[in-house]
Image: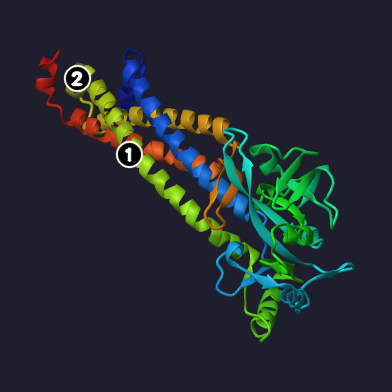
Amino acid sequence: MLNWLSQVAAVTWVNLRTIVERRGASLATVVGVAGVVIVFVAVFSIAEGVRHALTSNATSDTAVVLRSGSDSEMMSGLGRDDTRIIAEAPGVRRSPAGPMASAELYVIVDVPKRSTGTDANVPLRGVQPAAFEVRDEIQILEGRRFEPGRNEVLVGRAAASQFAGLDLGNRLRWGQNEWTVVGIFSAGGGLAESEIWCDAGVLQPAYRRGDSFQSVYAKLESPDAFQKFKDALTADPRLDVKVIQESEYYASQSEGLTTLIRALGIVITFLMGMGAIFGALNTMYAAVATRTREIATLRALGFRAGPVVLSVMTESLLLALLGGGVGAAIAYLGFNGFQTSTLNWATFSQLSFSFTVTPVLMGVGLACAVLMGLIGGLFPAIRAARLPVATALREL
């Protein structure tokens, strides 16, 4: 066993010492693998960023109430009487100000992107005062909250960074009103940071929505109170509503978009990975060809086929790991935290999010690099092991 291991070490060391002589081909393999890992991590970090933006702050002790049959707030509609019944339902947490339930209205406004100047659909959400208790992650970064009854808006941090004209103190015209930006807020990186908030009572007449709302967000006494709350509303003959936990609601919204991004990522990574594997194959076949005499001499001296195979595989794996490590590092430094926006198909509005490069993604990227190294080194290693000694000694 010791003799076999010493043979592996000796042959591997000979192979590694000659990498400098083959630095062009070796560098091509490293770059190819690094490119695959960069693309894989970057694309999947988009899906992870979207998922994080939609679900990071969604909790199981917050319920979303929509009109029955609605898949999103855009398709829903509730009257003021409906919202009052919902707010007074059993299971809703109460504060000194009353039930912690916010009846909300959701419209789309055109705001130009900072990067291109083209108009984008940005959500303008009308909320009631209890919204700040329901979503307790909201923090004012600049300015102040809007005052009820006034044409004032509070802008999410991500929306303010992605779209023009949303700076503190700016005036904008949407609907029949002129609005003033009075504050910028954060929401722990969640979906609310892509939105603009205002008083629901002011938004209704601005868009001729009468006395209607589209959803109610209710903070419950505990996650266990959800079923009691849901049963009370669905059994009430005055209501025709759909009740869902906030965490489940946003998970369903993120599913379609993240699935598409991941599917595209897999296809792109596969195609690029095939190219990287062929590059590794060429590199290792060239490495075996240039060392034909050395391998044959070692075989003639009594070195077994196994150490030869392992030495070629080791070199291929090391090159792939080097490429994978470089690719993962570049992906993390270049993409993690990068802010952008995309269309949220559930609401047909812009969703601002940050690329999220996680340790798991980097680990999977390295695993892909290892797989490419194994495949790229396997067949050249087998060729080296099967090389006839007499024939090889006659080769240049």
Instruction: Residue type at mark 1: give it.
Output: Leu
- In this figure, which residue is indicated by the disc labeled 2? 292
Secondary structure of the residue carrying tag 2 is helix
- In this figure, which residue is indicated by the disc labeled 1? 271
Identify the image quadrant of the N terminus: top left
Give percent across and percent down for residue 320: 39, 31
The image quadrant of residue 319 is: top left
Kindly report the distance in space between the C-alpha atoms of the residues bearing marks 1 and 2: 32 Å
- The residue positioned 37% from the left and 28% from the top of the image is 32
Q: How many marks?
A: 2
The image quadrant of residue 143 is: top right
Category of crowding for the residue at label 1, using alpha-carbon neighbours closer than 10 angstroms: few (below 14), some (14–19), many (at least 20) = few
Using the image, determine if residue 226 lies above or below residue 50: below
- The residue positioned 68% from the left and 74% from the top of the image is 226
- The residue positioned 62% from the left and 79% from the top of the image is 240
Q: Is residue 316 left or right of residue 238?
A: left
Front label number (1 vs 2): 1
Q: Is residue 335 left or right of residue 95?
A: left
Instruction: Residue type at mark 2: give it.
Output: Thr
Using the image, determine if residue 21 lies above or below residue 197: above
Give percent across and percent down for residue 33: 39, 31
Give percent across and percent down for residue 134: 76, 62
